[in-house]
């Protein structure tokens, strides 16, 4: 029994060796089948390919999918080793592509204060984004189409097609001759890198009009004089509000409706800020038709030195910047109440100063423009 037992183990070992030998032969045959082609020469080729998405971990996500890529471009993962018969392709693998199936959004920017231009040309700007709530960040905007039309019933015409520009001059002769009092409307739509196209806007997104501006208006004091100087004595950390004897009156003497803007300036050793402080002062302004100054001035009445602040406010929003007046001042043919505005001012002196200056001159600039509907 013992001998048989030993013999049986030897036979099992023999069979195992035979099995391993057979396996080795199979492996060798497989290796020989994958030998390098002999008809060369062959190039070892690799590279990179930009698909517009991202290649960050993980390679599979809610908004991303793995797509096979055996076009001879290097990819993020090595999965196989292939040849196209001419070249060896290194790392065909997989590539993560962000799924982008929704179009971008775009808009022509409002011209703001330049909507009505005194020159027969306008700077038109536009832009867009390829980010949506559903997909997140897309592949990006590729280009824009920009259209224009003359008048509210005009036909839309192409201005820019497949452009990467974000602004351009319109007029005076290209792409159309700009005529006075003609309203030009603009719209755009965008294309993204994935091939999605934004729907063409059904209406305009911005408009502009050329009009020769001859604005006639005047500013005078309480006694109808053009002496705009208001002299007074005050102390530091004080608030001085103009009374009825120091109100300014803005009067439209022309035929066009006007909006009024105000700009301040820093003075010697004092900076103009929203609130007073050390070496800084503040100014407030309010337009209305009242015979007495406002009881309170607030942040919406602040004057800045960075540019003109324009009086705004409509019937539905009567208490905005510098309001409720100062905008839409009617022409000379109307009642005096509608073509004049009282301008009330308030000075807030610095809380303290690093250099004492006995006399200070506070400068204000007023500017008029045509009403922007």
Image: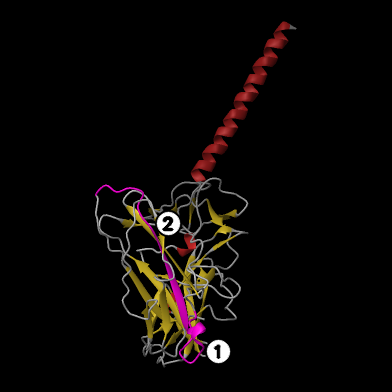
**Residue at 34% in and 56% down:** 234
Q: Nearer the viewer, residue 168 or 280?
A: 280
Left or right? Give the position of 221 relative to 207.
left
Residue 223: horizontal and vertical position, in percent?
A: 38, 79
Q: Is residue 306 visible?
A: yes
Badge 1 is on which residue? 152
How far apart marks 1 and 2 lie (CA) works out to 62 Å
Residues at discs 1 and 2 in contact (Cβ within 8 Å): no
**Residue at 45% in and 56% down:** 73
Badge 2 is on which residue? 87
Residue range highlighted in magenta: 328-355
> Which of the 4 image quadrants contains residue 343?
bottom left
Q: Inspect the magenta stretch and tell me whether residue 345 lies in it.
A: yes
Q: Secondary structure at mark 2?
A: strand
Q: Earlier in the sequence, mark 1 or mark 2?
A: 2
Residue 287: mark in rendering: none
Q: Nearer the viewer, residue 245 or 229?
A: 245
Quarter occupied by the N terminus = top right
* Above or below for 58 versus 129: above
Q: Inspect the magenta stretch and tell me whether residue 141 lies in it.
A: no
Which of discs 1 and 2 lies nearer the camera? The answer is 1
Q: Nearer the viewer, residue 159 or 282?
A: 282
Q: Nearer the viewer, residue 188 or 285?
A: 285
- How many residues crowd around disc 1 within 10 Å: few (fewer than 14), some, or many (20 or more)? few
Left or right? Give the position of 175 relative to 319.
left
């Amino acid at each position: 029994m013992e001998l048989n037992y030993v013999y049986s183990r030897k036979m099992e070992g023999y069979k195992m060796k035979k099995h391993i030998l057979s396996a080795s032969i199979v492996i060798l045959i497989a290796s020989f089948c994958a030998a390098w082609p002999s008809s060369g020469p062959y190039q070892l080729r690799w590279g990179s390919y930009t698909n517009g998405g991202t290649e960050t971990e993980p390679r599979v996500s809610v908004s991303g999918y793995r797509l096979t890529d055996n076009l001879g471009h290097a990819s993020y993962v090595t999965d196989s080793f292939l040849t196209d018969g001419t070249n060896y392709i290194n790392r065909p693998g997989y590539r993560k592509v962000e799924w982008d199936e929704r179009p971008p959004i775009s808009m022509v920017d409002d011209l703001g204060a330049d909507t009505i231009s005194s020159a027969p040309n306008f700077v038109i700007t536009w832009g867009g984004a390829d980010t949506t709530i559903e997909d997140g960040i897309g592949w990006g905007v590729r280009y824009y189409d920009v259209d224009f039309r003359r008048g509210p019933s005009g036909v839309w015409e192409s201005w820019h097609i497949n452009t990467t520009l974000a602004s351009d001059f319109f007029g005076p002769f290209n792409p159309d001759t700009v005529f006075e009092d003609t309203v030009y409307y603009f719209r755009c739509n965008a294309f993204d890198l994935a091939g999605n196209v934004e729907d063409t806007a059904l209406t305009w997104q911005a408009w502009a009009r050329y009009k020769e501006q001859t604005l006639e208006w005047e500013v005078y004091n309480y006694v109808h004089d053009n002496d705009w100087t208001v002299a007074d004595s005050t102390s530091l950390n004080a608030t001085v509000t103009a009374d009825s004897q120091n109100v300014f009156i803005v009067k439209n003497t022309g035929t066009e409706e006007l909006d009024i803007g105000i700009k301040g300036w820093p003075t010697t050793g004092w900076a103009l800020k929203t609130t007073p402080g050390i070496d800084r002062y503040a100014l407030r302004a309010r337009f209305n038709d009242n015979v007495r100054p406002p009881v309170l001035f607030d942040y919406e009445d602040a004057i800045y030195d960075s540019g003109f602040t324009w009086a705004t406010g409509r019937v539905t929003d009567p208490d905005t910047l510098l309001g409720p007046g100062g905008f839409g001042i009617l022409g000379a043919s109307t009642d005096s109440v509608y073509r004049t505005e009282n301008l009330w001012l308030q000075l807030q002196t610095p809380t303290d100063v690093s250099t004492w200056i006995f006399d200070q001159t506070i400068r204000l600039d007023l500017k008029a423009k045509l009403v922007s509907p």
